[in-house]
């Protein structure tokens, strides 16, 4: 447990958490929406500080990040809690806090970094749950990792306030950000959040020089309308046509068990829409195909991906056939 960053003391012992756009006003003895930040006598505490609920070594492609040091390994950690309550959450057993118990094993930032180095990982990914909600752990760890030459990655829903993002930006190298839909109703009813802060956050990540890739999980009957997918693709392209867009397949889970899995035709349609809107790199996920990188200029196969096995032909950051520069970090 550690005193939280980014909160304001209000009257009568109440505090306002300013870490994310929920801006929870929390009475003494109560917790915010994320269930891991608690007001104790007018002081806001992070209850999940340096308590890991998961720690694994993953291929970077699993994040998914396809244009950030492809083929490398990332030490991937999580703490319990989330500021979303998505009805389709794949990791709901660790993202949604049940009762008052904060689960997790104690792990210092120094030990996390050393474990990453000992396992020959190039980066540390803050993932599986929402890294914003274990911000203090991510912030302290990322500073040490940065000094040791490791990269830092957020796999995030993008629901973070501007100041916390600016504060960690010097140590944050990349992020995969979910853009779950392009309508307010979806964010309200399915996620328990708002759309606009996510759009603003994506733009700010980009402006801060953090490499970003966007993921949209396509859920039949919820966010698979062609017009909406086109709005998402256009939003990304308006920022930068080189931002990769991952359109991934949904499978029934958690509280959306009555929703059918995404047909491959829906991903193919989204892929086509992304290309029509000018995106240079569109990938299909969770179906075992559509994950290769091709040169936007000449069409040459540059990175072949087969269940996280990566064969990379990019040379000096460029296509070996036509010399086109392939956008990303550590691409060769």
Image (cartoon, helix red, strand yellow):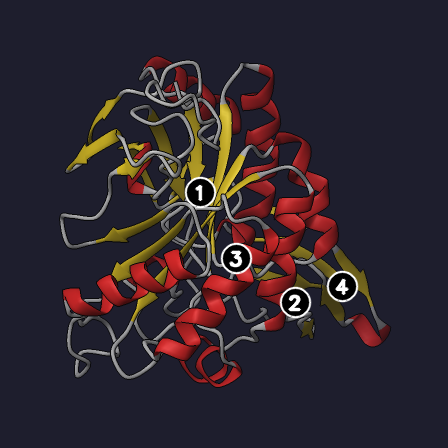
| CA–CA distance in space, label 2 to label 4 | 21 Å
Circle nearer the viewer, 1 or 2: 2
Q: Could you say whether the residue bearing mark 1 is in a helix, strand or loop?
A: strand
> Who comes first in sequence, dot 3 or dot 1?
1
Q: Is residue 148 left or right of residue 309?
A: right
Q: Are marks 4 and 3 in contact (CB under 8 Å)?
A: no
Q: Are marks 2 and 4 in contact (CB under 8 Å)?
A: no
Along the line of sight, the residue nearer the viewer: 151 or 312:
312
> Mark on residue 6?
none
Residue 67 in sight in this render: yes
Q: Are marks 1 and 2 in contact (CB under 8 Å)?
A: no
Q: Which residue is mark 1?
A: 51
Q: Could you say whether the residue bearing mark 2 is in a helix, strand or loop?
A: loop
> Who comes first in sequence, dot 4 or dot 3?
4
| CA–CA distance in space, label 4 to label 3 | 41 Å
Q: Which residue is mark 2?
A: 21
Q: Are marks 4 and 1 in contact (CB under 8 Å)?
A: no
The percent coordinates of residue 124 (x first, y second) are: 44, 30
| CA–CA distance in space, label 4 to label 1 | 23 Å
Q: Which residue is mark 4?
A: 42
Image quadrant assignment for residue 80? bottom left
Q: Which residue is mark 3?
A: 236
| Label 3 Cα neighbours within 10 Å, binned few <14 / some 14-19 / many ≥20 | many
The percent coordinates of residue 178 (x first, y second) are: 44, 58
> Who comes first in sequence, dot 1 or dot 2?
2
Residue 91 in sight in this render: no
Circle nearer the viewer, 4 or 3: 3
């Amino acid at each position: 447990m550690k005193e939280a960053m980014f909160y304001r003391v209000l009257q009568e012992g109440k505090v306002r958490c300013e870490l994310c756009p929920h801006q929870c006003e929390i009475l003494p003895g109560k917790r915010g929406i994320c269930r891991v930040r608690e007001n104790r006598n007018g002081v806001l505490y992070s209850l999940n500080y340096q308590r890991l609920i998961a720690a694994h070594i993953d291929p970077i492609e699993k994040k998914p990040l396809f244009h950030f040091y492809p083929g490398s390994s990332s030490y991937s950690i999580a703490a319990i809690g989330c500021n979303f309550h998505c009805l389709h959450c794949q990791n709901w057993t660790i993202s949604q806090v049940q009762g008052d118990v904060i689960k997790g094993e104690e792990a210092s930032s120094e030990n996390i970094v050393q474990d990453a180095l000992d396992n020959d990982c190039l980066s540390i990914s803050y993932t599986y749950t929402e890294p914003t909600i274990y911000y203090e752990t991510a912030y302290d760890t990322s500073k040490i990792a940065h000094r040791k030459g490791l990269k830092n990655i957020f796999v995030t829903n993008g629901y973070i306030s501007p100041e916390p993002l600016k504060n960690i930006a010097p140590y944050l190298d990349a992020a995969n950000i979910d853009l779950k839909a392009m309508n307010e109703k979806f964010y309200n009813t399915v996620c328990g959040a708002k759309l606009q802060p996510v759009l603003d956050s994506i733009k700010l990540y980009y402006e801060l020089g953090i490499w970003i890739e966007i993921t949209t999980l396509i859920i039949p009957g919820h966010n698979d309308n062609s017009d909406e997918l086109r709005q998402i693709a256009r939003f990304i392209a308006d920022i930068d046509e080189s931002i990769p867009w991952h359109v991934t397949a949904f499978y029934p889970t958690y509280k959306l068990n009555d929703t059918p899995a995404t047909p491959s035709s829906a991903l193919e349609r989204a892929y086509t829409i992304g290309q029509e809107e000018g995106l240079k790199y569109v990938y299909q996920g969770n179906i075992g195909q559509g994950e290769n990188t091709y040169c936007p200029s000449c069409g040459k196969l540059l990175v072949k991906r087969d269940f996280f096995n990566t064969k990379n032909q990019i040379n000096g950051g460029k296509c070996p056939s036509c010399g086109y520069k392939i956008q990303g970090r550590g691409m060769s």
